[in-house]
Amino acid sequence: MRVLSLTSKALFVSTILSLMLGLSGCSTTPKSDGSSASRSVPQTAPRPRETTTTPVESTRPVYAGPWEDPSSPLYNRTIYFDYDSAEIKPQYLDLMRTHARYLGSNTSVKVTLEGNTDERGTREYNLALGDQRAETVRRFMLAEGVLPSQMTTLSYGEERPADGGHSETAWRQNRRVIIQY
Amino acid sequence: MSRFQHLLLILTLCTLNLAGSGAVLAAPRLNIQITGGVEAAQPIAVVPFGVSEGLIPSADVAAIISADLARTGRFKPMPTRDMLDMPSTRDAVDLREWSLLGMNNLVIGRVEAEGTGYRVSFSLYDVFRGDELASTSLISSKTGMRHTAHLIADIIYEKLTGQAGVAATRIAYVTSSGSGDSQTVTLKVADADGYAPQTIVSSGEPIMSPAWSPDGRRIAYVSFENRRAAIYVQELSSGRRDLVASYPGINSSPAFSPDGLRLAMTLSKDGNPEIYSLNLLSRELIRLTDHYAIDTEPAWSPDGRSIIFTSDRGGSPQIYRMSATGGPAERISIDGDYNGRASYSPDGRSIAMVTRINGSFRIGVLDLDRGIMRLVSSGDLDESPSFAPNGSMVIYATIYGGRGVLAAASVDGGGNQRLSQDSGQVREPAWSPFMK
């Protein structure tokens, strides 16, 4: 049960964190006031503490593989979709087969299938739609012989548009799955 | 294991940094513009509060109260320049004078020194009947004066409308600037009037779906840091956070149960987006839906017995309701080819949702008793509705001038307002519960 062990590790992380915060003196003391004539007001609402995330440092070499070469058939890595649809259009079958063949003969290479949507509709629904798009591509690649261990899916929904505009021109660019090596 | 060691290292560094600087970032605050609909607003005069000799209060209490009352859409405070007299004690009040000026109600008050802070006293009058409706004093720290003014506004609002006020509540929202790999996304919490914004978490990757715990002390959210979607629950006072879901696929749409013990969420770890319920103490995870369509955006009914969610199982996204323990679901959205992101009003009698009308995404409020949907917004890409804890207003995200801003609409058709930042995008508002 990989899933359960992740959760217990998360608990471990949070326990360590809480110990550290305890040591650095971040405690709050509730105030009470027994005065009857006046109401007691909290000093202010407690100040929320900030958490900052640090980007993972990129250690990519200058040339990572043939997918970065514009003359390579692997260079095209984006599959576009119709609105509110996770169906793969026939014109992208060759593109996916090209990548499947490469991955099939290079089983140590791994990809992330990044699912994206346009901005129309709700954000959480779009996250689910992006997930379905990535999952459809994953299943096709599996059927073409790519190993399950070579692929992960990651949906960004409408959160990472290729084009930030609010028109069909922008939306068309944003409804996509990227095969990210 | 290495990923988690890495995560631990990052969090450790942040914690040290936090303890070292103790800094509060000077964040741009939300500016609020009232954009219309105050016909039925009642005239009220909030006279500038008297101040003891030599005292310079840290905030203009009367101005804050006036702005709070105006934002509700139910009151139209008198401009200070129109006042003929500015009494701050009971003896100096001549109610006939305020009656002639057309006021229904009058508020006077005083600020005096008390310890290292202030004592703020006020009285509320019914001008026509000549009654004193409320008279109270509150002790405030120097830095807590805005909060004290919000509490007074809420006392006045409740006395005059019979409904609890929300001036002392808060709003969580997501802001972003830049795009692609150079974007900065920040989850913030500000007072309901947009002041005192605090950064909860900041990242170069998307942050989504802030959700308040019912006691207002924790916020659940989705973060894509380390290029991986995960749901965190963060305690506001300490900044301490728990990673509660980080499964393969999406980890989305957290929603606290009304008792705060469970977190509903959407996971696709089993191959398709489904709704689950996580017991926050035992960490037991129960799957509630099982359908090849998209099931997402869970929201609890106020009694905790049912969950409404969005599903496209019928061919288009619609709102369904099921038991909070799973089982069969019935469709509850009536019209339209796209209904999503529903949430119950605090009294459980209506549901706010995103609905598509003639190609535009608007905010609708469905009256469950009468089966009537009322549109409360007029944009093309409106989303993420969230009820105020007294049910009087819905805050939502909209596009204005090409930028993402927040807007709030009165549920009964009263005042509307727009909340925007000087720069960057603002989205995904979540109105806090009443702070306990």
Image (tube, grey):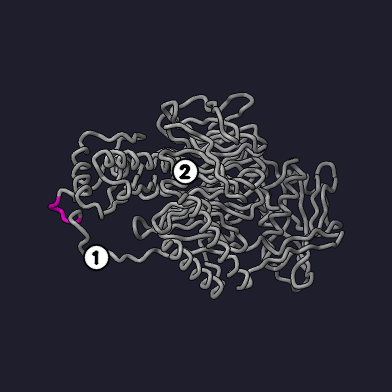
Say which chain tag 2 marks: B
Q: Which residues are magenta?
A: A68-72
For the residues labelled 1 and 2, say whether their Cβ atoms are less than 8 Å apart: no
Picture coordinates of residue A11, whole percent (x, y): 55, 58
Q: Which quadrant holds residue B152?
A: bottom right
Measure the C-alpha gap from mark 1 to mark 2.
34 Å
Q: How many marks?
A: 2
Query: Residue B134 or B51: which is nearer the viewer?
Result: B134
Q: Secondary structure at mark 1?
A: loop
Q: Are marks 1 and 2 on the same chain?
A: no
How busy is the neighbourhood of tag 1: few (under 14 within 10 Å), some, or many (20 plus)?
few
Say which chain tag 1 marks: A
Picture coordinates of residue B208, whole percent (x, y): 47, 50
Left or right: residue B199 versus residue B312 is: right
**Residue type of the residue flagged with mark 2:** Leu
Residue A124 numbered tag = none
Q: Residue furthest left?
A: A71
What main secondary structure does the magenta stretch of the protein show?
loop
**Residue type of the residue flagged with mark 1:** Pro
Q: Which residue is mark 1?
A: A61
Q: Residue at x 47, y 40 (%)?
A: B382
How busy is the neighbourhood of tag 2: few (under 14 within 10 Å), some, or many (20 plus)?
many
Left or right: residue B413 versus residue B9 is: right
- Magenta segment: does it hold B428? no
Picture coordinates of residue A180, whole percent (x, y): 28, 52
- Magenta segment: does it hold A71? yes
Q: Secondary structure at mark 2?
A: strand
Is residue B226 visible in the rendered image? The answer is yes
Residue B267 numbered tag = 2
